[in-house]
Amino acid sequence: MQNSVVNASERRVGRISIARIKRELHDVSYLSDDLVFTAINASINPTERSPKTIEGFGALIMLAGEATISVNMKSYTVKPNTLVFFNPGSVIRSERVSANAAGYFLTYSKSFINDIQVGLSSSLPIYMQFRLSPLLNVSQEEISEILQVFRLMKQQLRGDKQLYRNEIVRSLFATAFYIIAEINNKQKEQQVKKGRSSVIFDDFMRLLEQHCRHERNVGFYAEQLDLTPKYFSTAIRDVSGKTAARWIDEAVILEAKTLLKYSDKSIYEIARELNFSTQSFFGKYFKQHTGESPSRYKRK
């Protein structure tokens, strides 16, 4: 049993930027400071000595050996054919790593993932996977499929293509994302039993994708599912840890960001499309949830 007295240096949590990972690790392929892809093993382990938090999102693919990893104070045993996901700010530490441990580590910034246009129905279940459990076990065939895409990504990152390299890498990343989303969905469908609250949450996600552009009222979604708003809200919070209202707000903001960044519509037209009574109300809503105005976000 480990000594319960942990010295001060072990308690300190270091912060690792994507730029630092790119600079200090070996066998690194990267796209600016937005995407870094690297091989890791027992000797190349950035969280070996003390807990670390990484600025961006991260994904670890375990190919050989075994490790015990602590994520936000909870320990997980990671074996081959396991994916481990990290959200920005997650506190990570390698508690035990076998001598033959090997895998790939991918880390990417928030701005990079914002540029990858994936559907709400695909991204939200994956987000829930990150939140509820950072591990996803996959088959040998599935891991081979994912690795094929990652190796292509690595080849493009190290190649001499200049004009469309960013677009190719982003497309490959989106491909890997959808493969993982498909695996996650397949595993959910194979569950023999599903709690009532989980069913309500899944139905809510489907409704949210269909109606978030014009419906922001919790009561609307509860009515569509023939539930009282109180029961509906409780079920959503129990499953996801977030209120239905917050899910609605996040979906609306995602749609707003997509329209602002990728469409030629004016802010007034976007406000109308998202069913805001005035452009001013849309601007206040957007700034409340993002910290910046729609016009400033559109200019970025």
Image: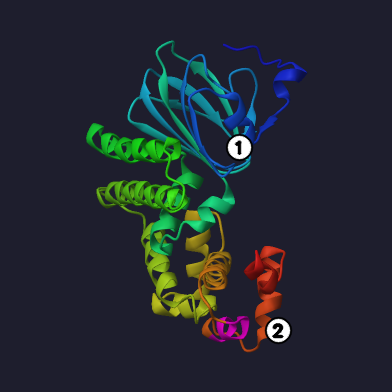
Q: Residue under circle 2?
A: 280
Q: Is residue 73 above or below residue 2?
A: below
Q: The C terminus appears in which quarter of the rendering? A: bottom right
Q: Earlier in the sequence, mark 2 or mark 1?
A: 1
Q: CA distance from mark 2 to mark 1?
A: 37 Å
Q: Is residue 270 above or below residue 102?
A: below
Q: The N terminus appears in which quarter of the rendering? A: top right
In the image, is 177 to the left or to the right of 273? Answer: left
Amino acid type shown at disc 1: Ile
Magenta stretch holds residue 159: no
Q: Secondary structure at mark 1?
A: helix
Most distant residue in the bottom direction: 277
User: How was this image coloured?
Assistant: rainbow
Q: Residue under circle 1?
A: 18
In the image, is 151 to the left or to the right of 276? Answer: left
- Seen from the viewer's position, the closer of residues 243 and 277 is 277
Amino acid type shown at disc 2: Ser
Residue 73 in sight from this viewpoint: no
- Seen from the viewer's position, the closer of residues 231 and 179 is 179
Near mark 1 (Cα within 10 A), the count class, few <14, some 14-19 or many ≥20, is: many
**In terms of secondary structure, what is the magenta stretch mainly?**
helix
Most distant residue in the right direction: 8
Q: Secondary structure at mark 2?
A: helix
